[in-house]
Image (tube, rainbow, N blue to C red):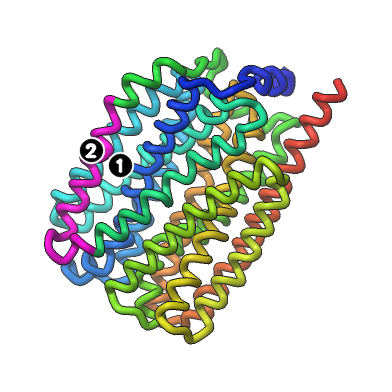
């Protein structure tokens, strides 16, 4: 019965309308807010460490706090979008994000900061799953990979400007003002979501939460669920290591603090370019092949960054290329995930993948912090993250192949 629903859902939207396009653009803007809220911590991390006199291991714990919140949001809050509709859950997520960000700029201790980052993460983990499901359902059937991919591009697009603004404003305004400003940006999006999202409120599933979770492990979906969890786990393990530590790693590679922040901004510019490129190519090429190729190429760029002595210009260029290949390739996992499940439990499937996978995102920055505290060489540090990235590409290919097999079966029937 669930398989038949996939076929039905795929034929609902034949063309773009002004309404569906506006909803996808709103999701893009909300994902921009996600990018600001997550990446701003990596840009202020060196200053925060210096002012609070905390080590790399403690900073890794603060990075992981937001990721713990994302796991909570993905597992426990995002699946409610299949029951109550996408609108209510997205609005609740925006409220969590804005409250946590503003409070993060007001706290004065590490423990309080940790818990505020958990609240921010809960909102982000929730909204990521709900937006991916909503974008997939709004777009024409043959444009769904493009729509989901473009929504994901909002994250690195905002992160680029976040890095540039932090580099300019941090010396004069301090990190506290920057965090409060990021929270205010999220507040501004709330009325836009309130007005627009009712026009495309998702159907609330009639099944209970337990039945929707059980559906993920039915014979048709068990394999793709487990491989999707593994793809997200290993992908986020590497991605959040890079996102969290790229300014610090660039400084370790010989750049100044300001150039380290610029390296982080260039990484995120590359991430936007890579995500946009992936979205366009996904209309013409199978994602199951595109994602592994980009992630495999990302491992080569990472090894170059970690092992070769380069000029400032080359270091910044390689940081840009890592963003193109790593973030672009990983963001291809979400269109694959959105096509793996029917609408009745799509947000549940994506939410659980985000929640389970976030344990990898928690481990990634934390492990990087401990390795850096242990004075591991930059080359060995990057080498240790190459194998998980290759596993991510393989698992994404398996999910894509499993989903395509189901669709071929539908076509035959």
Q: Earlier in the sequence, mark 1 or mark 2?
A: 2
Q: Secondary structure at mark 1?
A: helix
The crowd level at tag 1 (other Cα within 10 Å; few <14, some 14-19, many 20+) is: many
State yes or no: residue 186 in magenta: yes
x and y percent of residue 141 in the render?
Answer: 65, 27
In the displayed structure, 277 sits above or below 270; it is above
**What is the number of the mark on residue 167?**
none
- Looking at the picture, how far across and down is residue 85, in whole percent? 45, 19
User: In the picture shown, does residue 309 fall above or below 96?
Assistant: below
Q: Which residue is mark 2?
A: 99
| The stretch drawn in magenta includes residue 346 | no
In which quarter of the view is residue 69 placed?
top left
SS of the residue under disc 2: helix
Does residue 198 appear to the left or right of 273 in the view shown? left
In the rendered image, the residue lying farthest to the right is 412
Q: Which residues are magenta?
A: 168-191
- Horizontal side of 392 relative to 302 (left or right) equals right
- Label 1 close to label 2 by CB (< 8 Å): yes
Residue denoted by label 1: 119
Q: Residue at image x 29%, y 60%?
A: 164
The residue sitting at the bottom extreme is 309
* Quadrant holding the C terminus: top right
Disc 1/disc 2 C-alpha distance (Å): 8 Å
């Amino acid at each position: 019965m669930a398989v038949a629903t996939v076929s039905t859902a795929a034929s609902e939207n034949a063309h773009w309308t002004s309404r569906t396009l506006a909803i996808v653009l709103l999701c893009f803007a909300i994902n921009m807010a996600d990018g600001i809220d997550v990446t701003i911590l990596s840009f202020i991390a060196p200053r925060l460490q210096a002012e609070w006199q905390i080590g790399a291991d403690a900073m890794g714990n603060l990075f992981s706090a937001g990721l713990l919140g994302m796991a909570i949001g993905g597992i426990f809050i995002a699946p409610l979008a299949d029951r109550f509709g996408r609108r209510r859950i997205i609005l609740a997520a925006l409220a969590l994000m804005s409250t946590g960000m503003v409070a993060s700029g007001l706290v004065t201790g590490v423990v309080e900061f940790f818990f505020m980052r958990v609240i921010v993460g809960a909102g982000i983990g929730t909204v990521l799953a709900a937006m991916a499901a909503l974008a997939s359902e709004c777009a024409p059937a043959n444009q769904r990979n493009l729509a989901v991919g473009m929504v994901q591009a909002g994250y690195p697009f905002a992160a680029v400007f976040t890095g540039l603004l932090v580099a300019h404003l941090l010396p004069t305004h301090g990190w506290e003002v920057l965090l409060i400003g990021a929270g205010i940006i999220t507040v501004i999006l709330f009325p836009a979501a309130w007005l627009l999202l009712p026009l495309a409120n998702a159907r609330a599933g009639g099944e209970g939460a337990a039945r929707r979770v059980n559906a993920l492990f039915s014979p048709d979906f068990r394999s793709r669920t487990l491989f999707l969890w593994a793809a997200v786990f290993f992908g986020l393990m590497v991605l959040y290591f890079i996102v969290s530590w790229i300014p610090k790693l660039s400084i370790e590679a010989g750049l100044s603090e300001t150039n380290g922040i610029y390296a982080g901004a260039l990484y995120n510019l590359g991430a936007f370019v890579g995500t946009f490129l992936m979205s366009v190519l996904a209309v013409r090429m199978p994602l199951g092949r595109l994602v592994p190729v980009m992630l495999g190429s990302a491992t080569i760029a990472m090894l170059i960054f970690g092992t070769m002595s380069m000029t400032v210009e080359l270091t910044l260029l390689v940081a840009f290329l890592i963003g193109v290949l790593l973030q672009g390739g990983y963001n291809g996992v979400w269109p694959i995930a959105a096509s793996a499940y029917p609408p009745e439990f799509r947000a549940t499937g994506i939410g659980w993948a985000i929640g389970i996978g976030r344990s990898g995102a928690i481990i990634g920055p934390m492990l990087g912090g401990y390795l850096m505290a242990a004075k591991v060489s930059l080359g060995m540090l990057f080498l240790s993250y190459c194998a998980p990235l290759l596993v991510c590409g393989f698992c994404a290919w398996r999910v894509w192949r499993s989903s395509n097999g189901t669709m071929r079966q539908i076509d035959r029937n």
